[in-house]
Amino acid sequence: MEGSMMDDPLAETHSLCRSFADGNRTRLPVLFDINCHIDAGNSIALVGVSGSGKTTLLHILGGLDIPTSGTIAWPALGPREKLRPAKIGFVFQRPSLFPALSVVQNVALPLLLLDGSDDALVAATDLLDQFGLLDLAEKLPEELSGGQAQRVAMARALITKPRLVLADEPTGQLDSSTARQFLDVALYLIGRSGAAFVLATHDDAVAARLDIRWSLDAGRLSIDAWAQEARR
Ligand SMILES: Nc1ncnc2c1ncn2[C@@H]1O[C@H](COP(=O)(O)OP(=O)(O)OP(=O)(O)O)[C@@H](O)[C@H]1O
């Protein structure tokens, strides 16, 4: 790969705003003038109170939603249509597993869709093992607790070895000890692959495990100055 492509940010926004129609022909502004970028290897905690816009920003960073004004681009990853599942892995806040597929089939699916790989089930089994979820492999999603389903969804997001992993409250339904173990594995796997990680969370103990802190306050983003220094 050429040097310039390797140095390009995975994602960057300029003056990005997002508002939603609220039914009375007025628009509800949710994100204001967001200027941020994500480089390879960054680990970013996206924090903010409920309703501050975390999910909305993650969806835009993942190419799942578009800004009302301003821009988002993925200079190192390519066009929006080609981002998932190969380049960006996404862990949704709400349950997103396919109900008719077993856990191991759910985890294997993105790799199967991508290249029809014979090894997809082997790779899925290996990932479940790393997360300590092997005994769930043959279960259906409806048999899982909320926290188990979110950990399975993280395994599924990682199976294509994406260069950017976006996770919306993946520890929201875990007790603190399980959350810590889960993060240990996720950070190890993501770090080993050199991917970048953006994790939305309410939990300060979780946020403290990541290098950079992005705070959303009523739709305005501030980037932690100490973390920016540490990143250089
Ligand atoms: N599709 C939509 N239509 C209208 N309003 C929306 C839509 N999506 C989000 N919003 C509004 O945008 C605001 C931010 O929502 P968002 O889900 O991004 O917040 P959040 O920080 O992720 O919250 P939480 O921590 O509770 O998940 C909220 O006021 C929400 O009601």
Image (tube, rainbow, N blue to C red):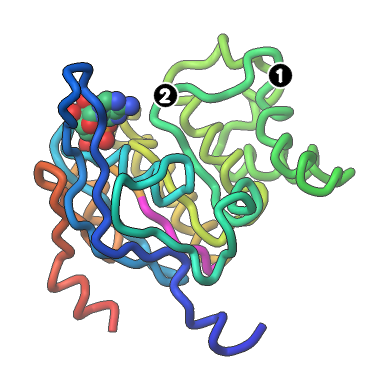
Residue 87: percent from left, percent from top: 60, 56
The residue nearer to you, when weighing 151 against 99, is 99
* Residue 94: assigned label: 2
- Where on the image, by quarter, is ligand 1? top left
Residue 158: percent from left, percent from top: 59, 48
Please, which residue is most extreme toward the left here?
A: 217
> Tag 2: residue type?
Arg
**Residue that numbered label 1 is attached to:** 101
User: Which residue lies at the image location 76% right of the left edge and 46% below the top edge?
Assistant: 114
User: Which residue lies at the image location 33% right of the left edge and 62% below the top edge?
Assistant: 13
Q: Badge 1 local density, few (<14 within 10 Å), some, or many (20+)?
A: some
The magenta stretch spans residue 136: no
Placement of 189 over or under 9, stated as above or below: above
Q: Tell me: 157 left or right of 230.
A: right
Q: Tell me: 39 left or right of 106.
A: left
* Mark 2 vs 1, N-terminal side: 2
Q: Tell me: 227 left or right of 85.
A: left
User: Which residue lies at the image location 48% right of the left edge and 78% below the top edge?
Assistant: 8
State the quadrant of the C terminus.
bottom left
Residue 62: percent from left, percent from top: 46, 48
The residue nearer to you, when weighing 59 against 199, is 59
Residue 50: percent from left, percent from top: 17, 31
> Tag 1: residue type?
Leu
The magenta stretch spans residue 195: yes
Q: In the structure shown, which secondary structural element does the residue marked by tag 2 occupy? A: loop
Q: Which residues are magenta?
A: 194-198
Magenta span: predominant SS is strand
